[in-house]
Image: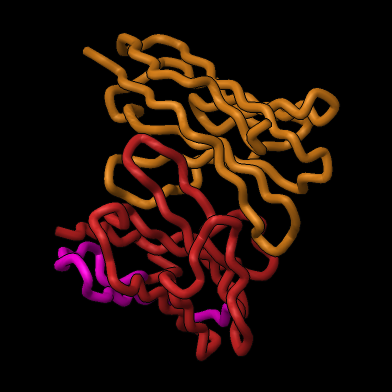
Chain colours: A red, B orange
Amino acid sequence: GAVVSQHPSWVICKSGTSVKIECRSLDFQATTMFWYRQFPKQSLMLMATSNEGSKATYEQGVEKDKFLINHASLTLSTLTVTSAHPEDSSFYICSAPILSHTEAFFGQGTRLTVV
Amino acid sequence: RKEVEQDPGPFNVPEGATVAFNCTYSNSASQSFFWYRQDCRKEPKLLMSVYSSGNEDGRFTAQLNRASQYISLLIRDSKLSDSATYLCVVNLNNNNDMRFGAGTRLTVKP
């Protein structure tokens, strides 16, 4: 079964609105979670590293004021796309590491469409 | 240079064919290596880890050459259900700092 749960799986929103995506670790604690974005026919690109109890670390070129990350508990990280625009339409996916496992565990992904 | 580079693809092969994917990575300090499979509009799922000694899982064989910083995946006796995008993934450290290749799309046709 899934070890990382992401919600919602898809969302359509109007331009200018904000959208929140949740990523939960199931039955384990995750002090770190990763947020990725994937445009059509492209690879997953790391957007930011979410750190429980501290500020997220953003990759170069990712606007921290536009993509707000909150990791308030050991099992939940949220990504809020603020003032969404059509160019933000993409597949957003989170992952969380599990101690003693080197492979990544992914949420189911969120397909965001901004109209 | 990209951190992880893969064959551009796409690969279109008939059922039963053998197909090989290649991948190179730039960071010699990379810790662990994987092949993931991603179906359209889905999250990536681990196909197999890759070890220096080479490892096999049924029809799938993965190989790692640390000296050349090269990873490969061989699929034998291709099935229709193997159609997907295959991602080469490198873990830079034990904190799951993963770097993804662009993916190679495989289509297996009847």
Q: In this view, does B60 lie above or below B10?
A: below
Left or right placement of residue A29 versus residue B68 in this view: left
Residue A111 location, x and y as percent? 26, 57
Q: Which of A67 and A25 is in front in this view?
A: A67
Quarter of the image with the N terminus of chain A is bottom left
Give, as a single range, the part of the protein colored magenta: A6-30
Whole-percent x and y of residue A85?
Answer: 26, 61
Residue B84 forms part of the magenta stretch: no
Residue under the image location 59 percent in, 84 percent down = A52
Residue at coordinates 47% horizontally, 77% vertically from top-left?
A: A69
Q: Position of residue B57 (x, y in %)?
A: 55, 33
Q: Is residue B32 above or below residue A81?
A: above
Whether residue A26 is visible to the viewer of this picture, yes or no, is no
| Camera sees residue A66 | yes
The answer to which quarter of the image holds residue A16 is bottom left
Tell me the quarter of the picture where residue B71 sits. Answer: top right
Q: Position of residue A109 (x, y in %)?
A: 34, 59
